[in-house]
Amino acid sequence: MSEIKDFIEKTMNFGLGIAAWSREKIEALVEEMVQKGEIAGKDARKFAADLIKKGEDQRIELRKLVQDEITAVLDKMDLVRKQDVREQIAAALRDAGLVSESADTDSP
């Protein structure tokens, strides 16, 4: 369990680091690279756009990874979820004849 907690913490810290690299910082970095001659001025805009796109893609991937890991941990814990309780209550009420089969069980 400690390993999972460490993994989630490291993943979140990594995600925060990526998020800190805002569009302005990337553009400033690319401008500096142009001034140093490390990249041609004509390529700078595309290079910056590619970096920004990669950062956005990584954030999306990271979010999915964290969600998947949290789901896996919760599944291992075998916790009862609200939807499970709602379905059990609805089934018990139907079995007792207190509600019809068509009663909505998805409402909160």
Image (spheres, rainbow, N blue to C red):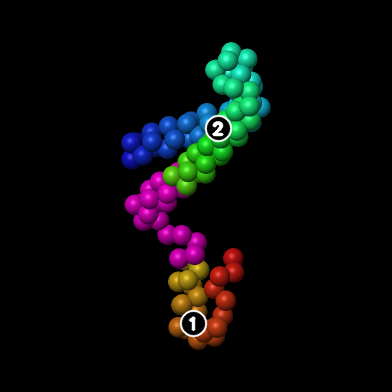
- Residue located farthest toward the top when viewing the structure as drawn: 36
The residue at the point 38 percent across, 50 percent down is: 72
Which corner quadrant holds the N terminus?
A: top left
Percent position of residue 77, x then y: 36, 51
The residue at the point 60 percent across, 33 percent down is: 46
Where does the magenta region start and end? 66-84
Residue 8 falls left or right of residue 54: left
Crowding near the residue tagged with mark 1, few <14, some 14–19, many ≥20 C-alpha atoms within 10 Å: some
Percent position of residue 53, x then y: 56, 38
Q: Is residue 66 above or below residue 85?
A: above
Q: Which mark is residue 94?
A: 1
Q: Which mark is residue 51?
A: 2
Between 44 and 89, the residue placed more toward the observer is 44
Q: Is residue 25 above or below residue 102?
A: above
Between 10 and 73, the residue placed more toward the observer is 10
Say what amino acid the circle numbered 2 marks.
Leu
Percent position of residue 100, x then y: 54, 85
Residue 25: tell me if it is visible: no
Q: Is residue 42 above or below residue 12?
A: above
Between 49 and 6, the residue placed more toward the observer is 49
Which corner quadrant holds the C terminus?
A: bottom right
Between 18 and 49, the residue placed more toward the observer is 49
Q: Is residue 50 above or below residue 30?
A: below
Dot 1: what SS? helix
